[in-house]
Image (cartoon, rainbow, N blue to C red):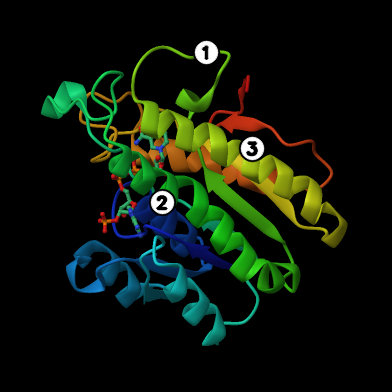
Amino acid sequence: MSTLLVTGANRGIGLELVRQYASDNQRVIACCRNPDDAAELTALAQVHEVTIQPLDVANFEAIDALVKAWDHGPIDILINNAGIFGPKVQAENDWRQSFGHMDYDVWAEVLRTNLMAPLKMAEAFAALVAASEHKKIVTISSAVSSIAETETGIYAYRTSKSAVNMAMATLANELRGQGIAVGLFCPGWVKTRMGGEGASVTPRQSIAGLRQRIEELNADQSPRLIRYNGDVIPW
Ligand SMILES: NC(=O)c1ccc[n+]([C@@H]2O[C@H](COP(=O)([O-])OP(=O)(O)OC[C@H]3O[C@@H](n4cnc5c(N)ncnc54)[C@H](OP(=O)(O)O)[C@@H]3O)[C@@H](O)[C@H]2O)c1
């Protein structure tokens, strides 16, 4: 049985990751900001080996405190899933990540959550991952990070994902010597609160693919951004 840690586990892609891994008899430490407001996760924890752990990934002192008090043993797969999109023009008519209207405090918050927190989690938990059997650190990025395929707008979100790609690609090279594989994956356009109802992929389909990609991930690969279906996305 493997042990996984998933951030942002109370809804969307994170919840489905917990559901599928736990249903497959894996042990999951499911981190979320508000366990009292996580009914679906609580229901999963009642029937599977799921431990719910309060964690706001933007609170780095809380990450340090969590690792200091850790009593769940080695972590086979650390999954940095928690993320925020920031203001949405289309759904909310909110232009704060559009050129000419940028809100730099919003940008800083998006960078802290989507870029810095995954590296902080990796720093905090690398030793526990290194002590495990499978030794994997995974970050959920996005195809909109791709400079090769850049369109317009969403400066905060787009740059946060491009930058986390660089951080994790660097980390992959750094941790290879310890046998730790570091992976970057795009889940597709998924029907979640972030992806919206018009998205093309269900969480179930996306996570079924992501689990295969995570299974295939190994420390010898060069860093790449891979879609849930196995396509390689140009940086
Ligand atoms: N959906 C898509 O189409 C899509 C496409 C590409 C990439 N992604 C990426 O996939 C990941 C999951 O997205 P999703 O679609 O599941 O989004 P979602 O439905 O909006 O869920 C986001 C999750 O992240 C959590 N979160 C946000 N900030 C956090 C923080 N500071 N500390 C802890 N948890 C935090 C949320 O918790 P709360 O409930 O407490 O807010 C929630 O559980 C994100 O990294 C996203 O960028 C999604």
Q: Residues within 10 Å of mark 2 (few under 14, many from 20)?
A: some
Residue denoted by label 1: 149
The residue lying at 30 percent from left, 60 percent from top is: 10
Whichever of callouts 3 and 2 sits on the residue coming sooner in the sequence is 2
Residue type highlighted by circle 3: Met
User: Cα distance, mark 1 to mark 3?
Assistant: 16 Å
Q: Residue at x 60, y 40 (%)?
A: 184
Q: Mark 1 and mark 2 in contact? Answer it, CB < 8 Å.
A: no
Label 3 to label 2: alpha-carbon separation: 15 Å
Q: Residue under label 2, please give it.
A: 113
Percent x, y of residue 182: 69, 49
Question: Horizontal and vertical percent for residue 185?
Answer: 56, 37
| Residue found farthest to the right | 177
Q: State which quarter of the image contains the N terminus.
A: bottom right
Disc 2 residue type (three-letter): Thr
The percent coordinates of residue 153 (x first, y second) are: 34, 18
Image quadrant containing the C terminus: top right
Residue 55 shows in the view:
yes
Q: Is residue 44 above or below residue 168?
A: below
Q: Earlier in the sequence, mark 1 or mark 3?
A: 1
Left or right for 157, reference 97: right
Front: mark 1 or 2: 2
Residue 166: numbered disc: 3
Total marks in image: 3
Ligand 1 within 8 A of label 2's CB? yes
Judge whether 88 appears above or below 210 on screen: above
Q: Which mark is residue 210?
A: none
Q: Which of the 4 quarters of the picture holds residue 104?
A: top left
